[in-house]
Amino acid sequence: MRAWFKPWGWIYRPVSVAGWLAVLFTLIFCVQVFLAVDRHAHSVSDTLYGIFPFVVPALMMLNWLASKTAAPAR
């Protein structure tokens, strides 16, 4: 199986089409959540509190996926 990600410091960078698609879909999801929450928010803190329960787990899932499909570090 070809690696999707490669360790890059504390994070992972995509090195295959599947990795780039995972990053792209995660970013699209986060932007969509931001736009939906911000449309009804009354302040910046409303927006931050509204997106937190969606964006943080999405980024954690992307990090987990990257860690499981990463090439071994040299």
Image (spheres, rainbow, N blue to C red):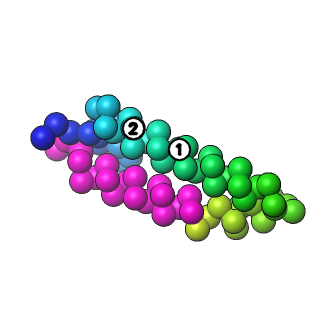
Kind of residue at disc 2:
Leu
Does the magenta segment cover residue 9? no
Does the magenta segment cover residue 64? yes
For disc 2, the neighbor class at 10 Å (few under 14, some 14 to 19, many from 20) is few
Residue corresponding to mark 1? 27
Q: Is residue 57 left or right of residue 72?
A: right
Kind of residue at disc 1:
Leu
* Residue 9, image x, y percentages: 36, 43
Q: Which quadrant of the view contains residue 44?
A: bottom right
Give the main secondary structure of the magenta stretch. helix
Q: Which numbered tag is attached to residue 12?
A: none
> Which quadrant holds the C terminus?
top left
Tell me where the magenta segment starts and ends, as one range: 54-74
* Residue 27, image x, y percentages: 53, 44
Residue in the image at 71% along x and 55% along y: 36
Q: Pick whichever of labels 1 and 2 is earlier in the sequence.
A: 2
Residue in the image at 63% along x and 55% along y: 33
Residue corresponding to mark 2? 21
Residue 33 shows in this picture = yes
